[in-house]
Structure formats: structure tokens, C-alpha cells
Image (cartoon, rainbow, N blue to C red):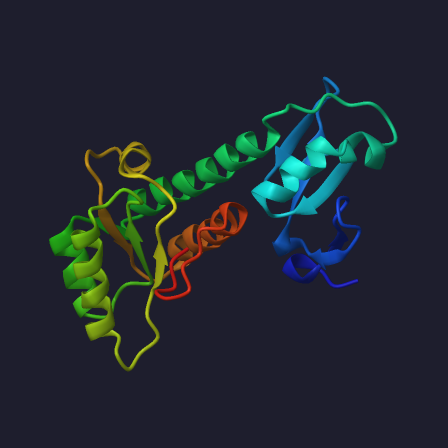
């Protein structure tokens, strides 16, 4: 069996095999309940489900967790929402580390300057940004990267969430410089976007 991101696991809901990057693991807690194991590293028995809010909701409804573990376990009715929150926390945590590492800039002017130099590995826009503000920033990206691969666009968090993650107020635009910190943020953003299905094919948003 392949290792790492290429490892395959079976979705307990659909019974189909998928790469672990397309799944999320749930672990049995010491108290006998089911909790999302977003890093896939918790000890003990686990259940893999397709990385999708709807799939987790369906797994709860069809009592997939108890059937897979062959024992009765306490499954919160709001497990899909809890999972989304955990994925958001992983993303905001990575953003906070990126800022501490000096790999992140905020503010429309600083972000636009980094974009114009084609120095952005990822562009971050608050999900509640004004449409005109979002449009102008994306136009800047298209101009700067017309003949180059554009940076990934992350738009899964609101301005309040970004502010809390970065210890700032009213965060609408941010950008990440290339490096390990940016890679960590992008990976977590991709998983969150896949889970809540907010991908936007027209501009590469995650």
C-alpha cells in the first residue's frame, strides 16, 4: 500500500476506496464518543468518511460509526458542524503561525504590492469582503500573473475569523509569501474548501 498522502482508505459510508487526502478520520474518544480526527493521528480505532459535510451528515443519519466499529458509540447529531469547526481551527492556527514567521502580509495596499511583484504564494480574501474590493484584487492578480501560474485564492474564512487568527481587526485581504508556512496554510484551506464545497472554478478559490 502507498504511504503518506497517497495511502488509500475505505469510506465507511460509500464503501469505496479513496486517497486519505479525500477522506477525514473519526476516532473513538476515551469516553466512548466519536470525534473528528482532522490530522488522522489519534490513537485507537477510527472510521474514515469522504471529506464532505453532506457525507458526514449522512453517516450520522445512517449510524455508520457504530456499525463500522461494531459497538455502540455516542455520535453528536451536529458532528458535521463540529468537524467544520475543527477544520477551520486548523486553518486559522496555520495562518497565525505564518504571521509569526513573517510569511504573511495584510491590508489591500501591501497585498497588492506583493501581487504586483508576483511574490504571493496564496491570496486570502475574507468571505464577507465587499464584492467590489474582491473584484479589484482579483483583477490585480490576473494582470500580474497573466503569463504565470496564479497564486491560490483562499476565501473560506470571514473577516472576524481572520482577525482572531492574526490578532488584528477588520482583516479583508492578506497574502502569503512562498515557503513552508504557505504550504501548510494552503493544504488546510484545500481540505476545508473540499469539506464545505466552496471551490470556485472560475478563479481558483479555495
In percent of width and height, residue 192 lies at 49, 46
Residue at the outermost left position: 109
Looking at the image, residue 170 lies above or below residue 148: above
Residue at the image point whose x is 49% and y is 33% from the top? 85
Residue at the outermost right position: 70
Residue 39 visible within the image: no
Residue at the image point whose x is 61% and y is 55% from the top? 21
In percent of width and height, residue 163 lies at 26, 35
Residue 112 visible within the image: yes
| Camera-nearest residue between 159 and 28 | 159
Looking at the image, residue 25 lies above or below residue 115: above
Q: Say which quadrant the C terminus sits in.
A: bottom left
Q: Is residue 34 left or right of residue 95?
A: right
Q: Identify the image quadrant of residue 66.
A: top right
Residue at the image point whose x is 52% and y is 50% from the top? 191
Residue at the outermost bottom position: 147
| Camera-nearest residue between 134 and 19 | 134
Total residue callouts = 0
Residue at the image point whose x is 38% and y is 55% from the top? 182
Q: Say which quadrant the N terminus sits in.
A: bottom right
Q: Identify the image quadrant of residue 175.
A: bottom left
Q: Is residue 10 left or right of residue 51?
A: right
Q: Is residue 182 left or right of residue 194?
A: left
In percent of width and height, residue 202 lies at 37, 66
In percent of width and height, residue 118 lies at 24, 70
Residue at the outermost top position: 31
Amino acid at each position: 500500500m502507498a504511504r503518506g498522502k497517497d495511502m488509500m482508505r475505505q469510506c465507511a459510508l460509500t464503501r469505496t476506496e479513496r486517497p486519505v487526502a479525500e477522506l477525514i478520520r473519526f476516532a473513538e474518544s476515551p469516553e466512548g464518543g466519536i470525534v473528528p480526527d482532522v490530522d488522522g493521528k489519534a490513537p485507537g480505532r477510527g472510521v474514515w468518511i469522504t471529506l464532505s459535510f453532506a457525507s458526514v451528515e449522512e453517516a450520522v443519519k445512517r449510524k455508520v460509526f457504530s456499525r463500522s466499529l461494531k459497538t455502540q458509540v455516542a455520535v453528536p447529531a451536529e458532528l458535521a458542524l463540529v468537524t467544520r469547526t475543527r477544520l477551520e481551527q486548523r486553518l486559522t492556527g496555520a495562518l497565525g503561525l505564518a504571521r509569526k514567521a513573517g510569511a504573511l502580509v495584510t491590508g489591500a495596499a501591501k497585498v497588492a504590492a506583493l501581487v504586483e511583484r508576483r511574490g504571493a504564494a496564496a491570496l486570502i480574501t475574507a468571505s464577507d469582503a465587499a464584492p467590489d474590493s474582491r473584484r479589484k484584487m482579483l483583477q490585480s492578480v490576473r494582470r500580474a500573473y497573466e503569463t504565470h501560474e496564479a497564486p491560490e485564492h483562499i476565501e473560506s474564512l470571514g473577516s472576524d475569523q481572520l482577525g482572531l487568527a492574526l490578532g488584528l481587526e477588520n482583516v479583508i485581504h492578506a497574502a502569503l509569501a512562498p515557503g513552508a508556512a504557505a504550504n501548510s496554510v494552503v493544504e488546510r484551506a484545500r481540505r476545508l474548501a473540499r469539506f464545505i464545497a466552496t471551490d470556485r472554478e472560475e478563479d481558483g478559490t479555495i
